[in-house]
Image (cartoon, rainbow, N blue to C red):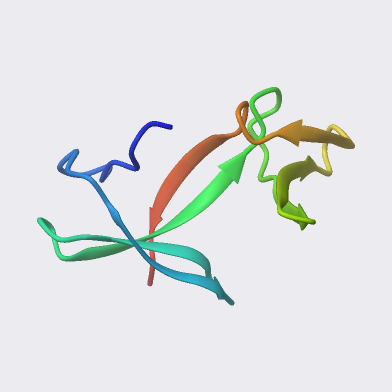
Amino acid sequence: MKPDLCPSCQEELTFKVSGSAKGEQYLCHACQRIYTRVAKCPDCQQTAEKIQACGSVSYFCSHCNELKSKTRIQFEYNDAL
């Protein structure tokens, strides 16, 4: 699995918070910035919803109306405000 990299400085991000109203948050120690990770559908680039059950993780794209494998999902990092 490839590391999560800061979109500003390309340093590795550290996981900070999960399950908050803003989603999963990551911290860049170099920039001192906090980012929110957003899952994007690889086919339509729309936001995908994380589905967890029995230890398995998949993503659902409501635009395509399909489940997407976690290996195909593309992640985008946005500034957490």
Number of on-image labels: 0
User: Residue 10: x, y in percent?
Assistant: 19, 38
Q: Residue furthest front?
A: 54
Q: On the picture, is 40 further left or further right than 15?
A: right
The residue depicted at 22 percent of the width and 45 percent of the height is: 12
The residue depicted at 70 percent of the width and 27 percent of the height is: 44
Q: On the picture, is 42 further left or further right than 11?
A: right
Q: Nearer the viewer, residue 74 or 12?
A: 12
User: Residue 62: x, y in percent?
Assistant: 84, 44
Q: Quadrant of residue 48?
A: top right
Q: Quadrant of the N terminus?
A: top left
Q: Residue furthest bottom?
A: 21
User: Residue 65: x, y in percent?
Assistant: 89, 37
**Placement of 79 over or under 11, stated as above or below:** below
**Placement of 34 over or under 72, stated as above or below:** below
User: Residue 16: x, y in percent?
Assistant: 36, 68
Q: Residue furthest right?
A: 65
Q: Nearer the viewer, residue 58 or 21?
A: 58
Q: Quadrant of the C terminus?
A: bottom left
Q: Residue furthest left?
A: 30
Q: On the picture, is 27 further left or further right than 23?
A: left
Q: On the picture, is 30 further left or further right than 80?
A: left
